[in-house]
Amino acid sequence: MAVAVSILASGCGYHVAGRTNSLPPGIKAIAVPALENRTSTYRVEQRMTNALVTELLARTNFRVVPNPEDADAVLRGEVTSLDGTATLFDPVTGRATTVLVTVVLKVRLEDRAGKVLYRNDNLLFREPYEISTDVRSFFQEESPALDRMSRDFAARVVADMLEGF
């Protein structure tokens, strides 16, 4: 009985997540130029671009190159919006204690001929961070929140590209 279940399960299309590659076999090198920043937040595009490069290097066998002319495909994108909204307030002072940062991005992967291999025009990420109410121990938490969000963004894009979503 166990053998029959094993045989049936092996042919039903299940696979281990993160082990597939739906990109054409000719793609060996991917260029990742800096994402465009359509927001007023300083250097957010650099965080997102660096996270994409790091994720591609860590999870794939692709060569990551800076120059699109040296690549089989180019991964381009843009940060279209970044907003911070206070979500929790101190009941005594009325000051904000938690902010929710929301980032919206567009990403597309094209081969040398311009054929779109992957595209998502509405990547949405949210990350909360706390604001200290004690001025003496204040630490700007927005930067670490953007770093966490960048890693989540990169992991999602690389997984979606490889798995054909």
Image (cartoon, rainbow, N blue to C red):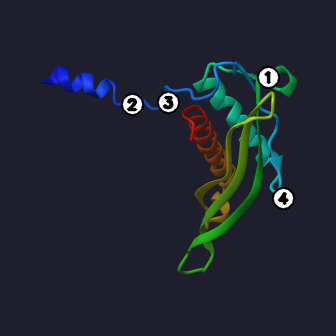
User: Badge 2 local density, few (<14 within 10 Å), some, or many (20+)?
Assistant: few
Residue 68, x across and y down, in percent: 84, 27
Q: Residue at x 59, y 56 (%)?
A: 127
Q: Amino acid at mark 4?
A: Ser
Q: Label 2 belongs to which residue?
A: 13
Q: Label 4 belongs to which residue?
A: 40
Q: Nearer the viewer, mark 3 or mark 4?
A: 3
Towards the viewer: 133 or 38? 38
Q: Nearer the viewer, mark 1 or mark 4?
A: 1
Q: Residue at x 24, y 23 (%)?
A: 6
Q: Amino acid at mark 3?
A: Gly
3D distance between C-alphas at marks 2 and 1: 31 Å
Q: Residue at x 62, y 40 (%)?
A: 157
Residue 29, x across and y down, in percent: 73, 21
Towards the viewer: 97 or 50? 50
3D distance between C-alphas at marks 1 and 3: 23 Å
| Residue 140 visible in rendering | no
Q: Amino acid at mark 2?
A: Gly
Residue 125 sits above or below residue 113 on the image: below
3D distance between C-alphas at marks 3 and 4: 34 Å
10 with respect to 149 (left or right): left
The quarter of the picture where residue 62 lies is top right
3D distance between C-alphas at marks 1 and 4: 30 Å
Q: Which mark is residue 18?
A: 3
3D distance between C-alphas at marks 4 and 2: 45 Å
Query: Mark 2 vs mark 3: which is more N-terminal?
Result: 2
Task: Name the element at disc 1.
Answer: loop
Q: Are marks 4 and 2 in contact (CB under 8 Å)?
A: no
Query: Mark 2 vs mark 1: which is more N-terminal?
Result: 2
Query: Mark 1 vs mark 4: which is more N-terminal?
Result: 4
3D distance between C-alphas at marks 2 and 3: 14 Å
